[in-house]
Amino acid sequence: MTKVGIIRCEKNETRCPLTNCFKTMIETTQGFAGYDACMPAGVFTCRCPGDNVADLAKILKSKGAQAIHLCTCTFASKTQDGWDKTNGGFCPDIEKIAANISQASGLPCTLGTAHLPKDYTPVTFE
């Protein structure tokens, strides 16, 4: 069973309890579809401008995380037709942050948890 850490955005932490992120993790659907089985290793919140993510990723790894996922809201926006990547999400630097997480921790970092945009394939930084 793969232990997965989640890092979310501070801009959404008081509005989203990650309910569907955990649901899709347990069901291994959406952003977690590439795993046979997975369980949470921990959750952290990224603080703008993302300078804290390297340390967060290292802590998650020390707690047993084998992969890290960044929440969908970091790179996509909720619309009346579902989630859409066209106008981005809360973080304009999410790809740089994902690469930093992977480099600092040595773990794969994937963009996406629940609510993936239509036709979106999760991108993993290694």
Image (spheres, rainbow, N blue to C red):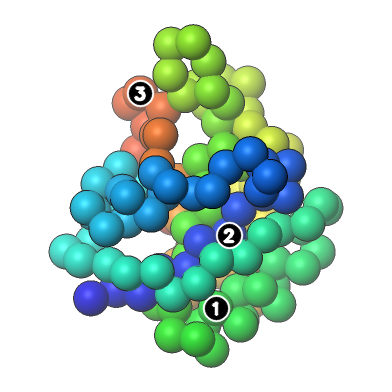
Q: Label 1: which residue?
A: 60
Task: Look at the picture and state if 107 lies above or below 51.
Answer: below
Picture mark count: 3
Point out the tag, 3 or 1, that comes first from the N-terminus: 1
Given residues 57 and 23, the one toward you in this image is 23
The answer to whether residue 7 is above or below residue 122 is below
- SS assignment at label 3: loop
Could you say where residue 9 lies in the image, as x and y percent from the top left?
67, 49
Instruction: Please give left or right for residue 78 compared with residue 88 in the image.
Output: left
The x, y position of residue 104, in whole percent, is 63, 76
Q: Tag 1: Cα neighbours inside 10 Å, few (<14), some, or many (≥20)?
A: many
Asked if the residues shown at circle 3 and circle 1 are in contact, with their CB atoms under 8 angstroms apart, the answer is no
Query: Residue extending furthest top?
Result: 80
Residue visible at 50% across and 86% down? 63
Which quadrant: the N terminus? Answer: bottom left
| C-alpha distance separating marks 3 and 1 | 29 Å
Q: Earlier in the sequence, mark 1 or mark 2?
A: 2
Residue at 30 percent across and 42 percent down: it is 30
Residue 54 place in picture, x, y as percent: 69, 73
Q: Secondary structure at mark 1?
A: helix
The CA distance from mark 1 to mark 2 is 10 Å
Q: Nearer the viewer, mark 2 or mark 3?
A: 2
- Looking at marks 2 and 3 on the same chain, the residue that comes earlier in the sequence is marked by 2
- Can you identify the residue that label 2 sits on? 7
Question: For the point 51% across and 41% down, which residue is it?
Answer: 72
Left or right of 118? Residue 85 is right
Query: Nearer the observer, disc 3 or disc 1?
Result: 1
Mark 1–mark 2 contact, CB under 8 Å?
yes
Q: Which residue is mark 3?
A: 118
